[in-house]
Amino acid sequence: MKRNYFYAGVLLVCASVLMLQIIETRLLSVVSHYYLAFLSISMAMFGMTAGAVWVYYRGERFTRERLPHDLTLFASAYGLSVVASLLLQISHAAVLVVSATMLVLWAELALVMATPFFFAGVVVSLALTRSHFRVALARRSAVLAFSACWEPLTGPLRSFLSPLSHLSGQLSSGCPGPRRGRSCTISSSA
């Protein structure tokens, strides 16, 4: 397995997990009128943790020699489960009347949502714990994927908030800023 392909695979899986969370949040906000939009993040955390714990308990099955095969298998399962999960979510009828049917349908939706994240958790856990490549670079790939997905969302917000943060820094220091050519200095005389 080539090092660059390995890091690119970790980057793409992590980026697609973040994109899937955003897509599922948007779908749930439409289906449940924003009441359960947080469920996608919860199911992502649950699914990825379940995948990592599953790898931990089946540690003897996953060896470094079988790592390329296992990563290919579970990354393919992740890709197929994303498609199946989104199709099932779109076709899922939302029941908002309190009944036993509602409980079953929402439990089914939670399991359908957690399935792709389970496979992603297996892939990331195998990549970080079983590979002979440096883990720090694999983590950097994951962080790069996060920042690549997060930057377009936070860029406009940060540019809007930066003047406000400068102002709040001046106000918290007790200095309202330069006035009439004089700068504000804070003396620490006791």
Image: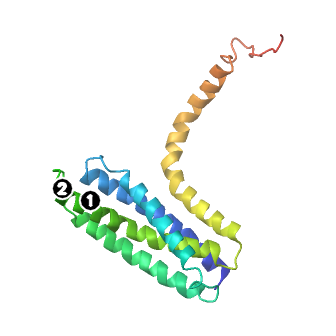
Q: Residue 135, percent across and down?
A: 68, 70
Frontmost residue, 44 versus 52: 52
Frontmost residue, 30 versus 49: 49
The residue wearing badge 2 is 95
Q: Earlier in the sequence, mark 2 or mark 1?
A: 2
Mark 2 vs 1: CB contact within 8 A: yes
> Alpha-carbon distance for marks 2 and 1?
8 Å
Residue 161, quarter of picture: top right
The dot on residue 17 is none
The residue wearing badge 1 is 106
At 65% from the left and 16% from the top, the residue drawn is 176
Amino acid beneath label 1: Trp
At 17% from the left and 60% from the top, the residue drawn is 101
Q: Residue 33, percent across and down?
A: 25, 47
Location of the C terminus by quadrant is top right
Does dot 2 land on a helix, a strand or a loop?
loop
